[in-house]
Amino acid sequence: MVQPHPAGASPYRLYALSNAGSLLALVSYPFFFETHLTRKAQAGCGLGVRGLRPVLRLLCRETLEAAVGSEEDDLPATEDLFLNSQPSTINLCLWLLLPACASVLLLATTNKLCQDVAVIPFLWVLPLGLYLLSFILCFDSPRWYRRFPFTLALIAALGGICWALDHADDLSLRQQVAIYGGGLFICCMVCHGELYRLKPDPRYLTSYYLMIAAAGPGGLFVAVAAPLVFTDYYELHWGFS
């Protein structure tokens, strides 16, 4: 087995950091910036952050070049040979389908919690935060996702969600939020963990991230198609199936 990259050399950890920034903004804006700053001050902060973008891009570029130029990898040599080859059609499809599945589950769970379970301000922050957290953990390091234990957890989560859907009237708000939120987190960890395991050589980084970005509109199934097809919140059933 070859030795891992030097600290900070892997370009994929930058994706974890970017999602960590998204999570920080998600939590901080409604509870701090919106309540403590005027709109004019918020606009000034936004302009200041945009001014830092060229510097941040330069730092990211240097990190990516260091990763591409490195001769070491954090995977076994046999897997490294496979991932250094041109991505197969199956891999390209999985780069699209895995994040699309997570996106569908995010929106379906959000609709279930915020429109069917309880109409509570900022409750939508919880499923989105769990979704971003799964991205952060999976792309930060391979140690956070292990296929076997998460497969067992996925089976338990799906069973718990099916049970909760059939016994919704007997469950409290906290119980439903815990079951649906926990199930979403485990499913997203599986989707994003498997996505990370399929990461290509940095030469194919652009294609990899483009496929992940293209999977975002997978939520159109929940936002557009589901209200036209279903008479209830069945998109959650279809999403977890």
Image: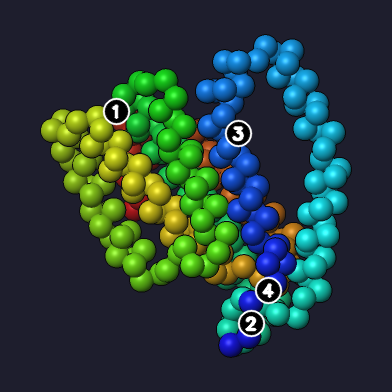
Residue marked by disc 3:
25
Per the image, label 1 sits on a secondary structure element best described as helix
- Which of disc 3 and disc 2 is earlier in sequence? 2
From the viewer's perspective, is 47 left or right of 212?
right
Residue marked by disc 4:
5
Dot in front, 2 or 1: 2
Residue marked by disc 2:
3
The amino acid at mark 4 is His
Label 1 and label 4: CA atoms lie apart by 46 Å
Q: Position of residue 200 (x, y in %)?
A: 66, 70
Using the image as rendered, state which of residue 165 and residue 129 is in the foreground. 129
- Which of disc 4 and disc 1 is earlier in sequence? 4
Work out whether 110 lies above or below 145: above
How many numbered circles are shown? 4
Per the image, label 3 sits on a secondary structure element best described as helix
- Which of disc 1 and disc 2 is earlier in sequence? 2
